[in-house]
Image (cartoon, helix red, strand yellow):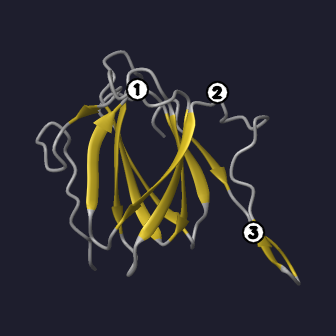
């Protein structure tokens, strides 16, 4: 596991009226601080990668569809420098993935329909000075092939 990454398994609580799933609470181990919550989506087969933040942590929860979430640790002083980690997250395996500042991340929709991600970040977005540092999804700096693995 990449240093600082934490996964919180999520569970449905069904009753005769429907279902409820708690995603994040202020007393959760993975919670740090509140900046903002936003929803982002990806269409089937679309990759949104790579980027990292210097000032904020991300707490990602896929609530519809399935995503392949990929993390790569490029932090110079990290004990897991150079490690890549993959999570398959969404309807079939609901979880929140905490992505610490400094860790590159991206995701790919692997479901047959659009996937929805709720991202809770520890700092609000600042359009004047965005805390986003990007590489192309196919950058040679991160040794990861986004192609689907059949077999």
Query: For mark 3, does the 10 Å Cα neighbourhood hold few (<14), some (14 to 19), or many (20 or more) residues?
Result: few
The residue that disc 2 covers is: 33
Residue 12 marker: 3
Query: For mark 1, does the 10 Å Cα neighbourhood hold few (<14), some (14 to 19), or many (20 or more) residues?
Result: few
Query: In the drawing, does residue 85 fall left or right of residue 4?
Result: left
Residue 47 % position (x, y): 26, 59
Q: Point out the frontmost of discs 2 and 1.
A: 1
Residue 68 % position (x, y): 39, 61
The first of marks 2 and 3 along the sequence is: 3
The residue that disc 1 covers is: 126
Query: In the drawing, does residue 83 fall left or right of residue 29?
Result: left
Name which residue lies at 27% across and 71% down: 45
Q: As displayed, is residue 110 above or below residue 49?
A: below
Query: In the drawing, does residue 39 fall left or right of residue 108?
Result: right
Residue 118 % position (x, y): 54, 53
Name which residue lies at 39% across and 29% down: 80
Q: As displayed, is residue 44 above or below residue 89?
A: below
Query: Alpha-carbon distance for marks 2 and 1?
Result: 16 Å
Relative to the observer, which residue lies in front, 32 or 78? 32
The first of marks 2 and 1 along the sequence is: 2
Which quarter shows the C terminus? Answer: bottom left
Farthest top residue in view: 77
Query: Alpha-carbon distance for marks 3 and 1?
Result: 34 Å
Residue 119 % position (x, y): 52, 47
Query: For mark 2, does the 10 Å Cα neighbourhood hold few (<14), some (14 to 19), or many (20 or more) residues?
Result: few
Name which residue lies at 75% across and 56% down: 22
Relative to the observer, which residue lies in front, 34 or 61? 34
Secondary structure beneath label 2: loop
The first of marks 3 and 1 along the sequence is: 3
Residue 106 marker: none
């Amino acid at each position: 596991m990449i240093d600082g990454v934490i996964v919180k398994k999520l569970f449905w609580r069904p009753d005769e009226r429907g279902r409820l799933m708690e995603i994040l609470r202020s007393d959760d181990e993975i919670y740090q601080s509140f900046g903002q919550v936003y929803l982002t989506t990806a269409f089937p087969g679309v990759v949104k990668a790579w980027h990292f933040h210097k000032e904020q942590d991300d707490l990602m929860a896929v609530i519809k569809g399935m995503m392949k979430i990929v993390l790569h640790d490029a932090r110079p002083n990290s004990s897991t420098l150079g490690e890549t980690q993959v999570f398959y997250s969404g309807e079939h395996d609901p979880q929140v993935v905490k992505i610490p500042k400094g860790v590159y991340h991206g995701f790919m929709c692997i479901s047959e329909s659009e996937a929805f991600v709720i991202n809770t970040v520890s700092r609000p977005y600042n359009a004047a000075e965005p805390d986003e540092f990007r590489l192309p999804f196919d950058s040679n700096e991160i040794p990861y092939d986004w192609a689907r693995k059949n077999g």
